[in-house]
Amino acid sequence: MRHTKTSYKLISLALCLAMLLPLAGCGESKQEQAEIFAMDTYMTLTAYGKNATAGLNAAKSVITSMDSMLDPELETSTTYAINHAEGASVVVPGQVARMLSTAQTVYKQSGGALDLTIYPLIKRWGFVDGKYYVPTDEEISSDLAKRCFDKLTLTSFPSSGTYMVQMPSGGELSFASVAKGCASDNAIEAMRQAGVESGIISLGGNVQTLGLKPDGSKWTVAIQDPNNTSSYVGVINVGETAVITSGSYQRNFTAPDGTVYQHIIDPKTGRPADSDLTSVSIITHGAMGGQGTCADAYSTALYVMGEAGAVDFWRSHSTVFDMVLITEDGRVLYTPGLADCFNEREGSGYVYQPLAA
């Protein structure tokens, strides 16, 4: 087993969660890059080869379309239609159906640690409009009563290729915990369909790769240090995969009494998750379809579950993903599948611990 310490010199960290180290040895392969702002996140898309421009244009179009489709406050969006259907069925696109199906699976697997119908609570705490507020117990109880993800139904009609969603009246959902993962899935596929064979995208904290670097080597993705966001705790060498992180440091506010509240809501309590983790990074296995969506869902659920719950969950799903956990007490835990590709940062101050299978 190889586990080395490195002292990589980074030029810049990617937007929130992970960073791409500079590419080396890319030869004469054409590189094109685009930056856009969507889903409240700055995104960087990079493609290589003669079809790079077409691939980037296709990827940007996909992301922009999904942004409009999923915004719960936009009256023309699919999400808005579901939330205001008053219990009636709504026809939804395939992307929405796939996100819901993945989220429903993780909801069941995690015992409800991921629940898309906590949007009333997300709004109540001010994480939608930035008007931060600490709700009363009564307000939290009222919003908890609106959860209904276990009652939401998704129906597929294979003959016509259409999907219908029905949610109980009064419920409201948000795709925030899976949207960027699905967007990266679709953006990578759009680049592939455009003829791109090598590319990498960073949608905030979601990094997803297409193929290998143009020179045939692996990509290098860094995991951000939640206690020093200008630095990193280690780097992972990967092929085609998704590396997606959720953490308490990404968005929070400080109440008048000095209490810091972070944005990941525990669906069971209606309050910011009281987790002993500061960061959860999910690394999917292989070039499987929907890997970004799955990784996005898992990263949120495992953060809510905390260290013990996350480790137990991984042991039951170790064939699906690997992970890096950063704990409140300064440890970096990584799974055995990363032993030969995860390199810790020398002098980080963290204690690095490989997890047993």
Image: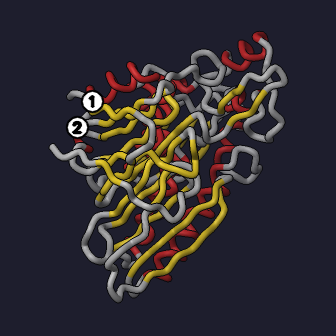
Res. 128 image quadrant = top right
Which image quadrant: the N terminus? top left
- In the visual, does 123 lie left or right of 31? right
Reply above or below: 294 against 18.
above
Disc number for residue 105: none
In depth, the one of 177 and 12 nearer the eye is: 12
169 w.r.t. 37: above or below? above
Say the numbered circle drawn on residue 336: 2
Do residues under tags 2 and 1 come within 8 Å of each other at their CB atoms?
Answer: yes
Q: Secondary structure at mark 2?
A: helix
Amino acid at circle 1: Leu
Pick out the residue farthest to the front.
347
Position of 157 with respect to 176 (left or right) is left
Whole-percent x, y for residue 216 in the image: 25, 73
Q: Nearer the viewer, residue 235 or 132?
A: 235
Label 2 Cα crowd, 10 Å radius (few <14 / some 14-19 / many 20+) = some
Q: Picture coordinates of residue 183 (x, y %)?
A: 52, 56
Amino acid at pointer 2: Pro
- Give the x, y percent position of residue 229: 58, 47
Q: Give the residue at x 28% y 36%.
A: 335
Marks 2 and 1, how far apart in space?
Answer: 6 Å
Q: Which residue: 36% across, 85% down?
A: 29
Q: Quadrant of residue 24?
A: bottom left
Colour scheme employed for the rendering of this structure: secondary structure
Where is 175 relative to 57, above or below?
A: above
Read off the residue under disc 1.
355
**How many numbered circles does the render carry?**
2
* Position in image of residue 37 (x %, y %): 66, 62
